[in-house]
């Protein structure tokens, strides 16, 4: 058995910045199944040799200290390039012939990775079908599709329908790189591999949940894409809802792809839809000052670069517990964290004064930059009467000193060996759009909350904190915790 990963859009930034470094690192750690060939396809008329030379330079830059010429040379022997235009039938026939030639007669599992412009996904898939590259006579065929998967529910459905004409659902791997992050996976272990958290993980003990994905970067050179997308499509429909699903899901029967995905999708099905005034009351919109001066952004753009959504999951576990989802560009730091804010103790045993009054406990799970968690709990101030203070218990994933693998490392390997658990299923993607679509529509209408401007390097617009305070709560604006 051998493996081939065919990357369409091979000359793009994602390929050199993420895909090849991830595959190289897996090869270096001896985890890439042998042999695995990588075949790049793009319109540029490179030879394999020229592409390898380009990748040598970019990989050395992106993997830094992990780059070793001898390892790279051994890895690069399996890198090939074939020019091809997604719109050209003949090119697909030639690509097919090239793949057969390099694979020989050995059964080979093939992964077609679409790292092209999203507008080309449907055509590329149809072309694979037309050229017979989806047939599984001599090994499995899978296709990996990058985000964005559609721009709304109807385009996502159309895309699903058109892909399903060529590939079965179990052959389709929709990537959301947040699911490849170690701490996201560890969330399941934390919740379901221990007995101490899960009994508290419900409406009886949890006051609310905050999920924050803050980025320091601005939109940079992606203005053209970003202004049409905005933060709801760029971050909420995919990454943030994924984080919410792993936080809120029930325990799957077993840790296998379908059982996990069944439980995740149920969370989205239980999200209470917004109606009427909900659209204005349950969200905050912001745009960083200077956004309209960025390349590719219209002077009067109303696109949000910061948003907060308050969602409810209407089921037995979560009824009445708000999930505050927040993300922004140009924030004070880069951090992704999930804060489980527990309820206050039911009885103030140690007196009512501030120093005797316990604050509620809090579990902060930090997904990035460092990966780990912190438990905030009460302890007695030493040598005081009965004064309390909030203490912290830290846990770092990387205490071993080893760098955690990049999300793409895990996901590319899973796609190669055929484990779909960390990829989004069609119903999951459609449910996510079903939640986000009406909010996007309402935020473009007079029912939208005001678009607040904010200074870069802050935690978003000031009204976001005021809005939270009106509900008797505060954002946990600390970064990074560990
Ligand atoms: C991408 C978004 O999907 O995720 C970007 O398009 C965003 O706008 C990025 O910056 C964030 O990913 P990470 O892994 O850096 O948190």
Image (cartoon, rainbow, N blue to C red):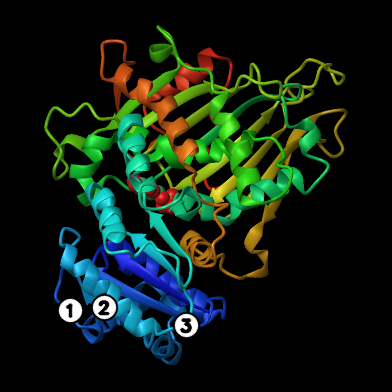
> What number is the disc on residue 46?
1
Please report contact status of discs 1 and 2: CB closer than 8 Å, yes or no.
Answer: yes
The answer to whether residue 378 is seen in the rendering is no
99 with respect to 351 (left or right): left
Identify the mark nearer the N-term, 1 or 3: 1
Place of residue 434 in the rendered image (x, y in percent of width and height, measured from the top left): 42, 26
Residue under label 2, please give it. 81
The answer to whether residue 376 is seen in the rendering is yes
Between circles 2 and 3, the one closer to the viewer is: 3
Q: Nearer the viewer, residue 361 or 147?
A: 147
Spatial separation of the CA atoms under disc 1 and disc 3: 27 Å
375 with respect to 372 (left or right): right
Question: Residue at 25% of width from left, 83% of height from top?
Answer: 48
Disc 1 element = loop
> What number is the disc on residue 106?
3
Q: Mark 3: give few (<14), some (14-19) or many (20+) Cα within 10 Å.
A: few
In this rendering, the answer to whether 276 lies above or below 334 is: above
Q: How many marks?
A: 3
Question: Residue at 43% of width from left, 90% of height from top?
Answer: 74
User: Is the CB of mark 2 within 8 Å of ligand 1?
Assistant: no
Question: Residue at 33% of width from left, 24% of height from top?
Answer: 440
Place of residue 31 in the rendered image (x, y in percent of width and height, measured from the top left): 56, 76
Identify the mark nearer the N-term, 2 or 3: 2
């Amino acid at each position: 058995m051998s493996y081939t990963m065919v990357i369409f859009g091979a000359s793009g930034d994602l390929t050199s910045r993420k895909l090849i470094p991830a595959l190289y690192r897996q090869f270096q750690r001896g985890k890439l199944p042998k042999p695995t060939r990588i075949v790049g396809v793009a319109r540029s008329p490179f030879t394999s040799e020229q592409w390898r030379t380009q990748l040598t330079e970019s990989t050395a830059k992106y993997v830094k200290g992990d780059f070793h010429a001898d390892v790279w040379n051994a890895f690069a022997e399996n890198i090939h390039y074939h020019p091809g235009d997604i719109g050209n039938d003949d090119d697909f026939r030639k690509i097919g012939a090239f793949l057969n030639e390099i694979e020989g007669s050995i059964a080979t599992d093939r992964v077609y990775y679409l790292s092209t412009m999203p507008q080309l996904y449907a055509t590329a898939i149809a072309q694979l079908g037309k050229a017979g590259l989806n047939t599984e006579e001599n090994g499995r065929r899978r296709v990996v599709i990058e985000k964005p998967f559609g721009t709304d529910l109807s385009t996502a459905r159309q895309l699903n329908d058109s892909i399903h004409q060529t590939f079965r659902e179990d052959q389709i791997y929709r990537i959301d790189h947040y699911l490849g992050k170690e701490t996201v996976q560890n969330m399941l272990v934390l919740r379901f591999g221990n007995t101490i958290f899960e009994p508290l993980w419900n409406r009886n003990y949890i006051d609310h949940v905050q999920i924050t994905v803050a980025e320091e970067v601005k939109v940079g050179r992606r203005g053209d894409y970003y202004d049409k997308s905005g933060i709801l499509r760029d971050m909420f429909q995919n990454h943030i809802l994924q984080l919410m699903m792993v936080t809120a899901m029930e325990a799957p029967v077993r840790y296998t792809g379908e059982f996990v995905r069944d439980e995740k999708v149920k969370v989205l099905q239980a999200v209470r839809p917004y109606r009427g005034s909900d659209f204005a009351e349950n969200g905050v919109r912001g745009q960083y000052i200077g956004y309209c001066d960025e390349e590719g952004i219209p002077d009067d753009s109303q696109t949000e670069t910061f948003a907060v959504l308050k969602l409810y999951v209407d089921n037995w576990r979560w009824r009445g517990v708000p999930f505050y989802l927040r993300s922004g560009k140009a924030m004070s730091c880069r951090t992704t964290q999930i804060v489980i804010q527990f309820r206050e103790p039911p009885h103030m045993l140690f007196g009512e004064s501030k120093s005797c009054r316990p604050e509620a406990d809090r579990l902060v799970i930090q997904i990035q930059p460092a990966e780990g968690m912190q438990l905030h709990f009460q302890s007695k101030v030493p040598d005081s009467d009965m004064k309390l203070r909030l203490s912290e218990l830290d846990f770092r994933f990387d205490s071993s000193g080893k760098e955690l693998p990049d999300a793409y490392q895990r996901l590319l390997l899973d796609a190669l060996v055929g484990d779909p658990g960390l990829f989004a299923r069609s119903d999951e993607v459609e449910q996510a759009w079903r939640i986000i679509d009406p909010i996007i529509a309402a935020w473009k209408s007079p029912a939208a909350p005001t678009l607040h401007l904010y200074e870069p390097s802050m935690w978003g617009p000031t009204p976001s904190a005021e809005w939270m305070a009106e509900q008797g709560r505060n954002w946990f604006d600390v970064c990074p915790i560990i």
